[in-house]
Image: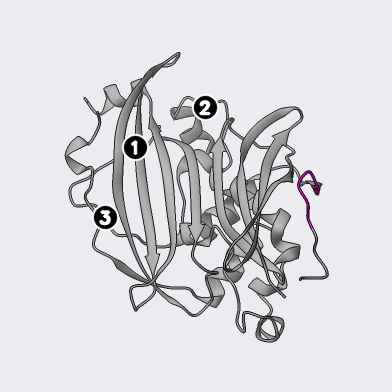
Amino acid sequence: MLYKEFVGLRSEPVKNLVERGPVRRFAEAIEDPSPLYTDERMATESRYGRLLAPPTFPRTFDYGRIEGLELPRVGLIHGEFSISYERPLLVGEEVLCSMQLKDSYDKRGRRGLLGFLVFERTGEDPYGERIFTTNDIVVVTEAVRRGIGA
Amino acid sequence: MNGTLLWSVGDELRERTLPPVDRMRLIKYAGASGDYNGIHLLDDAAEDAGLPGIIAHGMLTVATMGLLFSPHLEYGYIKTFRNRFSSMVFLGDVLRVGGRVVGVEESDEGLLHKFQVYARRNEDTVASGEVGFLLYRA
């Protein structure tokens, strides 16, 4: 089991601001034409009253670092991603973000011994109310595992 | 009830075909997301990682599946999104994204519509998952 000693540890929360420019750039990069991400006037007249952030925008936030946890820089495979929102994320909001290594387990498959790391990332408003939770499964192949001497 | 959107189990979202993946798209996504991992941008880095060429960011494929719901944001939002990556996406790949309704549940906020969604290259599924789209009560 990889990084066993880090399972359960959480990073110090980092304050992030959902800014209009980065949201616009993100919407352009994913070629999402929805005016609710970029058109201030339409957003103001919508039920949200202000601009929205695209559903995968929280990917751009800083979630801080889990003290001492150094993952290999190459060779990791993103296996799964999930996000769950309590409510939509709005432009102009301040979000406190942190991450946790939730689980680590091994599986032996056709491609040898694979390590699975489950990272949970959360975003809360300044009052401590949860806005979203994401889970990522990162796969560590046997070759990468050998590279880190585990 | 919301008069403009009525989905029932089995309804399909109109499949969309995306432009071929090109390097500029990956450069733009790297800049917008902050993910500058070389395997998405540099031929040498991809080669060093044992890949046949640079690969698209997995999260760009997820974002692309989210496009299916963008026309409906006035009436609801993506509440849950779960995605599994099953194949790498390379330069020149043409992806199609689509989905269909597999369930509808009442919740305090409105009607949660569950969709199965996919991103495919020809007959290969490169990513698939489930989206819970919450349709507000009128």
For mark 2, what is the residue?
Answer: B51
Q: For mark 2, does the 10 Å Cα neighbourhood hold few (<14), some (14 to 19), or many (20 or more) residues?
A: some
Q: Position of residue A98 (x, y in %)?
A: 32, 60
Q: Is residue A125 left or right of residue B23?
A: left
Classify the position of the N terminus of chain B by image quarter: bottom right
**In the image, what residue type sits under mark 2?**
Leu
Q: Position of residue A73 (x, y in %)?
A: 34, 39
Rendered position, B105 above or below B18: below
Mark 3, secondary structure of its residue: loop
The Cα atoms of the two marked residues, 1 and 2, are separated by 22 Å
Residues tagged 1 and 2 counted as in contact (Cβ below 8 A): no
The structure residue drawn at horizontal position 60% and vertical position 77%, both measured from the top left corner, is: A51
For mark 3, what is the residue?
Answer: A65
Mark 2 falls within which chain? Answer: B
The Cα atoms of the two marked residues, 3 and 1, are separated by 15 Å
Q: Is residue B103 left or right of residue B7?
A: left
Q: Assign the magenta stretch its main secondary structure.
A: loop
Mark 1 falls within which chain? Answer: A
Q: Can residue A36 be seen at all in this image of the molecule?
A: yes
Earlier in the chain: of badge 3 and badge 1, it is 3
Rendered position, B100 above or below A20: above
User: In the rendered structure, which segment of residues is drawn in magenta?
Assistant: B7-13
